[in-house]
Image (cartoon, rainbow, N blue to C red):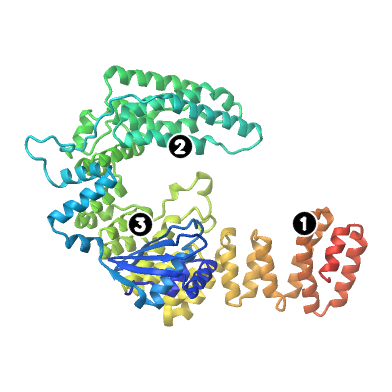
Amino acid sequence: MHIANLDETTLRYHATDKSFQRGESYYQQGAVVDLCQRGNCLYGEVEGNEVEPYHVTIQFDAGGVTEAECTCEYSFEGWCKHIVAVALTSIRKSETIHQRLSLNELLDRLNHVQTQTLVQELVAREPDLLDRIDQFVNKISPPIVGQVSTTETTVTRPKRQTSVDPQPYRYQTKQMMRNCLQHWEEGWEENPIDTDLPEILDQVQAFIDNGDGNNALVILAAITEACIEDWDEVADYGAEGDDLVALLDPIWATAVLTAELTSSEAIDIQVNLEEWQDRLGGSFEICSEALRQGWDTPELLAVLAGESEDLWEEERPSYADKLARIRLELLNLQERYPEYLNLARAEDLVEEYLVMLAQLGRIAEVMAASIRLKDAGQALAVAKVLREQDALAEALLIAKAGLDLPDRISAAPAEHQFFNIHQSPLLDRHRYELADWTSELAQGLGDQPTALSARITAFKLRPSMRGYQQVRTLAGEAWQTLQADLLQHLRTMDSWSHAEAKVQIFLHEGSIDDAISTVTDSYARGNLIQLVMDAAMSHRPEWVIAKAIAPAEDIMNRGKAESYQEAISWLTRARRAYIQAGREAEWQDYRARLVSTHGRKRKLMGLIDCADL
């Protein structure tokens, strides 16, 4: 078995050095105890520290690996050691992979009666599957005349017959507000509302997802009122009403558009919104507009029917996109795809429009409308869905075109937008992700020029040692010319966020002076400076001496005993540099001055003696 673009070079790119080394160890120990392929999925079991083995799944297509997952709790950068072990086994011992039937192949072997028996057994074990089967069957086959269906031209869900008790949600919110007060009273600056309230609102979203907007409104009213009752105390600590309303307003609008409201109920909600706005100072503008429009205004009906693309009679409000996306979410839940597309097109929500077309398998229409793509983030989202639809060639075309588009600059916080493009990792994030994704797909499809070009773009946006090595692998005979260009590009980048990558690459290439310049001109961490010192010891001992003495003396002069070991680390390098420069006598004089100045600091003197300085 061969997975496109899965080799050890690619594997090292996806895993950290530590993960790769540990995965290599697992492979050598024979920890991969079961490896099988079912269609486009590779499954492996890896023995680890737990009784049960870890389960690894690697999904792939003609362009290479699309997803790699493991049941372990690894949550750091790249692939975990278990994924590495399974991948290494598939690369080096492909003959050990058991070929088993895919799900489609298994189902093809069953006749009608056997398939029914299997489904009935599965439903007996998981009763909730019955509703999903019902929805699927009604979606692909019209109901029999005279038979009641749960799905008609639009999906309808059974109405809940009882009202929920809002008190538990009220209690949760009151507890959240008390925790906020305690948090701020203890001197913490973070706003717990930003993290805790969304978790409470997720419970409301569950009712909305089930089509139960009325009960969602009951819960929301309890949550909002509980926030407002204690708001004055919270506001004394600097909490902003605008921030709270920004969390509540969209989900209020979603619930309103999901519920079945009478005119009087809608008026009551609007009155409450205005009262809450007076207390908080924010504006429930999205929900207010949702109440005004509902689903029945002539302008909206015309847009949904595809008869008009002019939803707003006057100037388009600033919240229009947010409201449109809320409607799109609900239309998607109800599987009202033609109306979804009409609204997305009218509101110029290009990404949503093209992604839905792709999900519906209308690939030719996606390609024809791709000229409307505005930024790299949109191109990446559309290309990923095309790949899921097995339209790999079209996905690569969209991705390549997206690399010429700007990033979503507006997604970065306003305070970062004046930065140079290389000064903040927040900028060009989408272009980097697109370039990285494009390079891997192109390499898997055998398009080496595109793979190389995209990899160079990714490296220049976010340099790393792994990216540098990937460019070298893809460049082949052109590497010498490209190497000079990449190193010169690194020299022009002055971002502190790229200092570590620059140092690693410069030291790898023996460019000691460039590495020194990097840690001299940026806010480099101490361990990074020491890494450069160790490499520069014979090349620039004078620089090492000057760079090491200053932080060591700062620590010793401040008398911070807990930091003395750090001072010794600096002094050790200073001593080595003195000796390397042939100035050992000067070091002895300096050491004598240290003892004279700091001789009463017993812990420091003990450490100096132990380090044989």
Q: Which residue is label 2 attached to?
A: 198
* Quadrant placement of the C terminus: bottom right
Residue 548, image x and y in percent? 76, 66
Q: Distance between the Cα atoms at labels 3 and 2?
A: 27 Å
Q: Is 394 located above or below residue 97 in the figure?
A: above
Residue 582, image x and y in percent? 81, 80
Residue 325, image x and y in percent? 32, 40
Residue 166 relative to residue 365: left or right:
right
Labels 1 and 3: the sequence-earlier one: 3
Q: Amino acid at mark 1?
A: Ser
Residue toward you, 160 or 327 = 160
Q: Which-is-in-front pick, marks 1 and 3?
A: 1
**Label 3 secondary element:** helix
Q: Which residue is label 1 attached to?
A: 563
Q: Which-is-in-front pick, marks 3 and 2?
A: 2
Residue 591 relative to residue 448: left or right:
right
Q: Amino acid at mark 2?
A: Pro
Residue 288 relative to residue 47: left or right:
left
- Which of the labelled discs sits on residue 147, or is there none? none
Residue toward you, 432 or 157 = 157
Residue 247 relative to residue 290: left or right:
right
- Which of the labelled discs sits on residue 380, or is there none? 3
**Number of other residues with Cα within 10 Å of mark 3, as a class: few under 14, some 14 to 19, many 20 or more:** many
Q: Is 443 located above or below residue 365 in the figure?
A: below
**Label 2 secondary element:** helix
Q: Tell me, yes or no, if residue 274 can be seen here.
A: yes
